[in-house]
Image (spheres, rainbow, N blue to C red):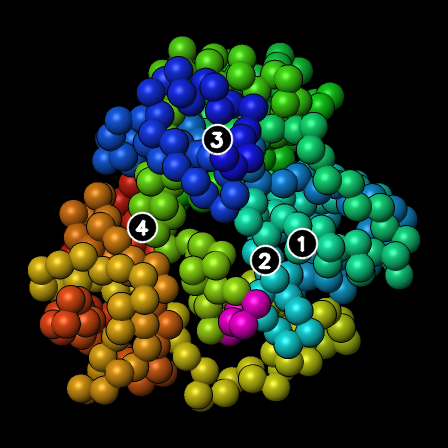
């Protein structure tokens, strides 16, 4: 038996199929992964993300701490509630985790880290924090529910506490608002608009049920993965890890190189490889032939092995098989993927595949 979120019994009562995931017992789907996927693309769906960890970072030097800790630069966060996506790197430039950090005020930033990396993330944070006199506080008292889809914000707003409804309605993308112990960010992992709501664990079951009563469809890990794949969003442990740098994971845009004097962890290793023509490219693939693209399948270009798929599957919105792949720099146009011993043609594209319900690549 794995760890269970506060919503575990609720998932069972709603007919979820439970599977192990990163040490947690989580819902895979509630009857139809496909219908859940389409609900998020066309209407509104909700996800239990209580297994992720909210970490509050406080102290007079917390901004300086995060400018040292992260590859992206929190100096650009000047408005309360503004969020930033970044990688947290080791000294070799490998990705310890990818995360979102929110600036609330000069002595408080809030970070959300991945479930499977929580233990090592906290160890790393606690190792780096003393030099900046920063307090690291994992908020195990909070639950987290993501509400995603074109109608998600509308359906979720009236279920929020009254003091939070107006601030949440006024949020721009990648901003957050807070009232008492509730916190709402206009972020997500699906390529659709929506909220990620952090709230007291004691209130999570009632909030989940209120969302369901408002017509928000419960969704499991299966739909979450096909949605994020269509959106071209990396999955930690599949698309990058501590041996892979952002330069080879399609995350160059998350590295803030300026100002040059900012000595973030991993910078020296990244600079040594910046602009290296041997760096592998991180690309999207759309299968032309028949079959399904899967993780770790080999990619061939000009009859030579040239990389492998890091995340692959069927894209319900496109009705095509798609993938993210790390490949040699010369790969472009068309390539081949080895599926069950046969090479099948695929087209190289630039992710995302789908954004806001619409195809972004030619199919």
Helix, strand or loop at disc 2?
strand
Q: Residues within 10 Å of mark 1 (few under 14, many from 20)?
A: some
Q: CA distance from mark 3 to mark 4?
A: 20 Å
Task: Mark 3 or mark 4: name the one nearer the start of the chain.
Answer: 3
* As drawn, 294 above or below 31: below
Task: Mark 2 or mark 1: name the one nearer the start of the chain.
Answer: 2
Q: CA distance from mark 2 to mark 3?
A: 20 Å
Task: Mark 2 or mark 3: name the one nearer the start of the chain.
Answer: 3
Q: CA distance from mark 2 to mark 1?
A: 7 Å
The residue where tag 2 is placed is 97
Taking the magenta stretch, the answer to whether it contains residue 243 is yes
Task: Mark 2 or mark 4: name the one nearer the start of the chain.
Answer: 2
Q: Which mark is residue 48?
A: 3
Q: CA distance from mark 1 to mark 3?
A: 21 Å
The residue where tag 4 is placed is 230
Answer yes or no: do the residues labelled 2 and 4 have beta carbons within 8 Å?
A: no
Q: Is residue 240 left or right of residue 285?
A: right
Answer yes or no: do the residues labelled 2 and 1 have beta carbons within 8 Å?
A: yes
């Amino acid at each position: 038996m794995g760890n269970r979120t506060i919503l575990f019994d609720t998932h069972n009562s709603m007919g979820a199929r439970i599977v192990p995931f990163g040490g947690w017992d989580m819902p895979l789907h509630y009857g139809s992964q496909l219908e859940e996927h389409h609900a998020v693309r066309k209407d509104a769906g909700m996800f239990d993300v209580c297994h992720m960890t909210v970490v509050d970072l406080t102290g007079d030097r917390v901004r300086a701490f995060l400018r040292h800790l992260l590859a992206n630069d929190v100096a650009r966060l000047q408005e309360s509630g503004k969020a930033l996506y970044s990688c947290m790197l080791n000294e070799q430039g490998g990705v310890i985790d990818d995360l979102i950090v929110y600036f609330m005020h000069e002595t408080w930033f809030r970070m959300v880290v991945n479930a499977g990396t929580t233990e090592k993330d906290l160890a790393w944070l606690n190792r780096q924090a003393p030099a900046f006199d920063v307090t690291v506080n994992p908020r195990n008292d909070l639950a987290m529910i993501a509400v995603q889809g074109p109608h998600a914000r509308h359906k979720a707003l009236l279920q929020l506490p009254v003091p939070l409804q107006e601030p949440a309605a006024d949020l721009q993308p990648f901003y957050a608002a807070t009232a008492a112990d509730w916190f709402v960010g206009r972020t997500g992992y699906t390529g659709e608009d929506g909220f990620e709501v952090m709230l007291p664990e004691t209130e999570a079951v009632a909030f989940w049920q209120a969302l369901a009563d408002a017509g928000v469809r419960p969704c499991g890990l299966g739909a979450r993965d096909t949605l994020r794949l269509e959106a071209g969003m990396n999955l930690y442990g599949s698309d990058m890890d501590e041996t892979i740098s952002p330069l080879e994971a399609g995350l160059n845009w998350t590295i803030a190189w300026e100002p040059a004097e900012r000595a973030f962890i991993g910078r020296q290793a990244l600079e040594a490889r910046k602009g290296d023509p041997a760096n592998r490219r991180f690309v999207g693939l759309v299968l032309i032939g028949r079959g399904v693209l899967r993780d770790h399948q080999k990619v061939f270009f000009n009859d030579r092995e040239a990389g492998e798929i890091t995340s692959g599957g069927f894209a319900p919105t496109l009705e095509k098989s798609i993938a993210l792949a790390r490949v040699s720099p010369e790969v472009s146009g068309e390539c081949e993927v080895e599926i069950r011993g046969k090479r099948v043609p695929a087209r190289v594209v630039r992710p995302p595949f789908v954004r806001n319900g619409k195809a972004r690549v030619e199919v």
